[in-house]
Amino acid sequence: MKFTHLAEKSLSGDALTHDEALAVLATPPEDILELLQAAFTVRQRYFGRKVYLHLLVNAKSGLCTEDCSYCSQSAVSQAGINRYRLLDDAELLLGAREARQARARRYCIVTSGLRAEPAEMDSLCRVARRIGEEVGIDVCVSAGLLEQQDAERLREAGVKRYNHNLNTSERFYSHICTTHTYHDRVNTLVHARRAGLELCCGALFGLGEDDSDRLELAMALREMRPDSIPVNFFHPIEGTLIEQTRGSALRENGLNPVKCLAVLCLMRLLNPTAELRVAGGREYHLRSLQPLAFYPANSIFVGGYLTVSGQPPGEAWRMVEDAGFEVVEE
């Protein structure tokens, strides 16, 4: 495989063929540096050596009706997490200030549940306005399924971006959730885009899917053209349904640092202009190879991932700079 050819295709706007994409996912360790260089050629064209930081706040934890098998906050999870209603304005404003201090470009407010209740949507819109006025940091909201009128309310309140991940392929979706569908998620993204919100839509790998599912999802994201693509790798949490039923198998889910890097490279080659973020599971799966993720990706989360702690901002700054990249807040 001539990876330089794939970079040329990506830069010209052409999609990789099915066989080319599967070959990327199957890249052996001895070829991973060549693949990373090809992905970096594309990344550098559109983002140079810039790295954007994002900070998440778990604004409402647990108390969810959905049966997503991977999630520690789902109705079927027995994970020992904190469960609480939506944080008040003061707590969310404090989180926005902490995001600014962490040099984050964006503050991501995430709530558990199928969708935001009316009173919760009122609160989210109110606090988004206050964050814009008092803190001056971009806000992304992730509050489950979204109707058109609520998408428009969020946009009017100053929310820039809405997150709702597809997570896995349409074929595999029923294996990880049965209380809502893949198409419910697609419809939410349609509503958000119609309202003028930027789309943040990504993936969760390592749930038992195979490379054909990974490729199907990658192509679906290319077709959707989100502004931001967070790539998550499943971090096993004791008590989640998927750990209760298939724990030992999931811990041997085919993900290793090289595989994760290959997934990130495929996402970059298929989505050359998208902000590509290494999201949940970064520390757990990439381990000592984390800095290599900056060759395809140009964004990371700092501080943690809702119910899992993550790399402190100061350590992330040093890692970015030591790898020859630059944290930017523009």
Image (cartoon, rainbow, N blue to C red):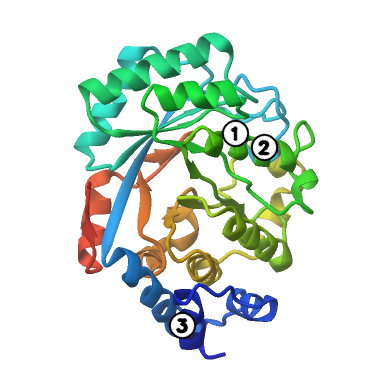
User: Which labelled disc corresponds to residue 191?
Assistant: 1
**SS of the residue at dot 3?**
helix
| Residue 51, x across and y down, in percent | 29, 57
Look at mark 2 in the image and give the residue it sits on: 187
Q: Pick out the residue farthest to the top.
A: 119
Q: Is residue 85 visible?
A: no
What's under tag 3, amino acid-wise?
Glu
Mark 2–mark 1 Cα distance, whole angstroms, equals: 6 Å
- How many marks are shown on the rendered structure? 3
Pick the residue in front: 215 or 242: 215
Q: Which quadrant of the view contains residue 25?
A: bottom right
Q: Residue at x 66, y 62 (%)?
A: 214
Q: Quadrant of residue 150?
A: top right
Q: Quadrant of the N terminus?
A: bottom right
What element does badge 2 sit on? Answer: helix
Q: Residue drawn 51% across and 32% down? A: 195
Q: Report x, y in % for residue 27.
A: 57, 80
Residue 114: % across, % down: 65, 25
How many neighbours does mark 3 have within 10 angstroms: few (below 14), some (14-19), or many (20 or more)? some
Please tell me the numbered disc located at residue 239. Answer: none
Please state which amino acid type lies under the numbered disc 1.
His
C-alpha gap between disc 1 and disc 3: 34 Å
How many angstroms separate mark 2 from mark 3 (CA)?
33 Å
Mark 3 lies on residue: 8
